[in-house]
Amino acid sequence: MIPLRDANPTRRRAIVTLALVVACGVAFGWELGLLARGEAAFEAAITAWGVVPGRLTAAWGRGEFVSGESLTLLSSQFLHAGWLHLLGNLLYLWIFGNNVEDRFGRIGFLLFYLTGGVVAGLAQVAIDPTSTIPTIGASGAIAATLGAYLVLHPGARVTSLIFLGFFYQLVHVPAIIVLGLWFLLQLVEGVGSLGPVEGGGVAFFAHIGGFAFGALVAAMVRLLGSARPASRMGVG
């Protein structure tokens, strides 16, 4: 099931969501430039700016909490391993990010998004703290956005593409089904991925950690009523 759009209008332009999409695109352009110079340059950049659990835990073990290794928890969120990785992430961010931004406010959403990415990165580090494989991608921060969307707009209709063998069909289903199935898949795949890893792969526990964080934050926002009333939001 691939979501294409949602029937959930916003009251103002999602400037931060758009800026994040552009930032990821610019970063990917930089990666392509490195790759044009040779695979070694590309891999060196990924290793330098991606989260390497073994390096991060070693740095924190030495008490180096404010360091370049800690910075990778942010920089890694803007790097991607290929076109499919990038476009898949940005599709989800574009569909679901605008409504979360609308609810949290622009500055609030930016802080939430980046923090969600950090929490997601730490969740993956906690699963394999000695790994030397770099973790990159916006999917952890986007998973936090999905978790928040599910709590804030569970009944919103999402137009999705379903493949049935050689055929496909467009269906309109509630967000709770689309995002609930997505999260269930991450849980199943995450448990299945436990064990020794010899090469790169999907950081399922970053998705799980990010999603749980986003859902928790959104639940607190609803409980405490800290989101701004719709009547005070500007229409753009």
Image (cartoon, rainbow, N blue to C red):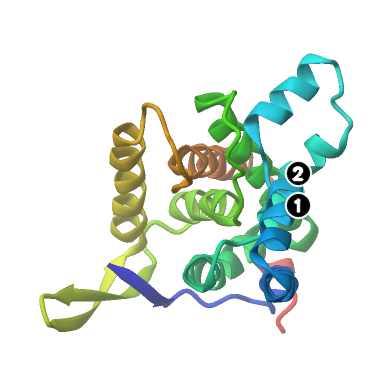
Q: Could you say whether the residue bearing mark 1 is in a helix, strand or loop?
A: helix
Question: Where the C terminus falls, by quadrant?
Answer: bottom right
Residue situated furthest left in the rendering: 165
Spot occupied by residue 146 in the image (x, y as percentages of width and height)? 49, 55
Q: Residue 120's quadrant in the figure?
A: top right
Say which residue appears at 56% left-offset and 38% top-offset: 213
Q: Amino acid at mark 1?
A: Ser
Q: Can you identify the residue that label 2 sits on? A: 72
Q: Can residue 159 be seen at all in this image of the molecule? A: yes
Judged left or right of residue 41, residue 146 is left
Spot occupied by residue 5 in the image (x, y as percentages of width and height)? 42, 78
Instruction: Give the vertical position of 53 relative to 98 (above or below).
Output: above
* 222, 41: nearer the viewer: 41
Instruction: Give the vertical position of 110 relative to 226 (above or below).
Output: below
Say which residue appears at 54% left-offset and 42% top-offset: 210
Q: Amino acid at mark 2?
A: Thr
Q: Residues within 10 Å of mark 2 (few under 14, many from 20)?
A: many
- Distance, label 1 to label 2, CA atoms, is 5 Å
Q: Can you identify the residue that label 1 sits on? A: 75
Judged left or right of residue 83, residue 36 is right
